Image (spheres, rainbow, N blue to C red):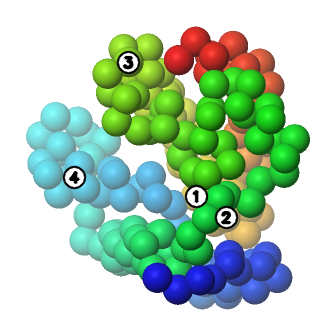
Amino acid sequence: MLNMSPWPWYITGPIISVVMMALLLLGRRFGLSSNLKTMCTIAGAAKLSDYFRFDWKAQSWNLVFVLGTVGGGAIARFILLAPGPVNLNPDTVKVLQSMNIGDADSAFAPAVLFGPEAWSNPLAVLVLVLGGVLVGFGTRWANGCTSGHAISGLSALQWPSLIAVVGFFIGGLAVSHFVLPILLPAL
């Protein structure tokens, strides 16, 4: 395992900008949720809904992009991630621990929600399923996911993407400040 720190914003930001500029120049739109639509189409969902009737082969480049994203995440996690605690502000750790997240200073994904014990807790399973349904509904209703709107849509100066991103942030802040402090201690 290599002992690397996360790359700073002044390196990753320009890399994302170059990738988005290349996609815009090639006439491509980026978004991870569109890959789910493509995979459902490949699996035959067009027999059930007209929404899935489109030329999925024209989107095959995006599937390769997702494979690269998953592969890059695996490389970052299993090869490049430095061992040791997560570098969080001590005040944030205290707040998270007060909400029943005991491993806030040692794990990126809290075990109370994503660990093996979460699957034996019916409330945790309900929260994960309900969260997934809400994210799926919101993605379809907004005609794109957070990555598609925030990265691709904003770089293309699309007004609907700006509205969607503002909504994502308002929703995220509301859940973080009002829902999670009530929900997490109950898990």
Is there a contact, CB below 8 Å, between mark 4 and mark 1?
no
Instruction: Write down the residue under mark 4.
Output: 41
- 38 left or right, relative to 26: left
Q: Which of 129/150 is in front?
A: 129
What amino acid is at disc 4? Thr
Q: Position of residue 103 (x, y in %)?
A: 60, 41
Q: SS at mark 4?
A: helix
Kindly identify the residue that appears in the image at 73 percent across and 46 percent down.
Answer: 165
Is there a contact, CB below 8 Å, between mark 3 and mark 4?
no
Is there a contact, CB below 8 Å, between mark 2 and mark 1?
yes
Instruction: Write down the residue under mark 3.
Output: 121
Give the mark nearest the N terminus, 3 or 4. Answer: 4
Q: For the residues marked 2 and 1, what is the alpha-carbon distance in whole angstroms?
A: 6 Å
Q: Position of residue 164 (x, y in %)?
A: 70, 43
Q: Is residue 92 above or below residue 187?
A: below
- Point out the residue furthest to the front here: 84
Q: Which of 73/115 is in front?
A: 115
Instruction: Write down the residue under mark 2.
Output: 151
Q: SS at mark 3?
A: loop
Q: Residues within 10 Å of mark 4 (few under 14, many from 20)?
A: many
Q: SS at mark 2?
A: helix
